[in-house]
Image (tube, helix red, strand yellow):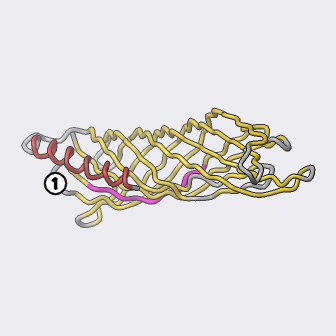
Amino acid sequence: MRLSTVLLLIQFIILGAISLSHAQEKPSRFSLALGAGYADFYPFSTSDGLTFEHYRPSLLARADYRVRDQASVFAQVGYLSSSESNQASILFNGDLLLLNDSVDMRSVPFSLGLAYQIPAGRVFLNLEVAGELHFFRYTAEQTQRLPQGEVRMASQRDADKRALGYSIAAGPEWPISKRLALAAQAGYRAVEVNGLRFSDIMQPSEVSLDIDGFFFESFLRIQL
């Protein structure tokens, strides 16, 4: 989370300076935003019984174009990553083996969507729906070690995958100045990935990702 905090501070400084330098100009229909948050990245399991489910920090950048007073279209790119490991011990041919399974997964989601903004006093309520294209990079590794530390066997498999999905989100947006606004929203994302396979030492495993989970994010928006 330190990286996310630093990025948020940097974007406040940079975008704030840009906003002040353009304070006398009329805002256009375009806006840019940078943000960070948490996403359910991701529940997944393998055929050998490993299961991981954790929320992870996420980063995002987006561009909006207002087609009407309260309606806009937007394009967004994000970045999410997760690394997990699991340890166990088994008795194999009279030897005690220490098993370590590790999984590293990264995703770059591209989103195209529609947003609608409802005035609510001094703030606005944003409602969004988007289609998503995820680019996954998946690495699975298993290592067998003897108690003395000697590596007996190791296997690794990398896989790349693309998958389609959708997301919906809602949340408030607070105007800070004529051009600057801070938004926060919660949403739900659904992406299903099939066909990720890798070979364990003991037996083949198939990985399926059913990425149905909530996400929370905030971003700073500047009207160009």
In the picture as drawn, the residue positioned furthest to the left comes out as: 24
Residue 202 falls in which quadrant of the image?
A: top right
Crowding around mark 1 (Cα neighbors within 10 Å: few <14, some 14 to 19, many 20+) is few
Q: Is residue 187 magenta?
A: yes
Amino acid residing under circle 1: Ser
Asked if residue 164 lies left or right of residue 9, the reply is right
The residue nearer to you, when weighing 115 against 154, is 154
Q: Residue 25: which quarter of the image?
A: top left
Q: Residue furthest bottom?
A: 121
Q: What stretch is highlighted in magenta?
A: 182-190
Horizontal side of residue 85 vs 39, given as left or right: right
Residue 187, x across and y down, in percent: 49, 57
Measuring 60% from the left and 39% from the top, which residue is drawn there?
164
The residue that mark 1 highlights is 177
Q: Is residue 219 magenta?
A: no
Q: Is mark 1 on a helix, strand or loop?
A: loop
Name, please, the residue furthest toward the right: 93
On screen, residue 191 versus residue 9, left or right, reads right
Q: Is the magenta stretch mostly helix, strand or loop?
A: strand
Which one is nearer the viewer's eye here, 119 or 205?
205
**Residue 50 pos. (x, y %):** 74, 54
Residue 88: x and y in percent read 76, 58
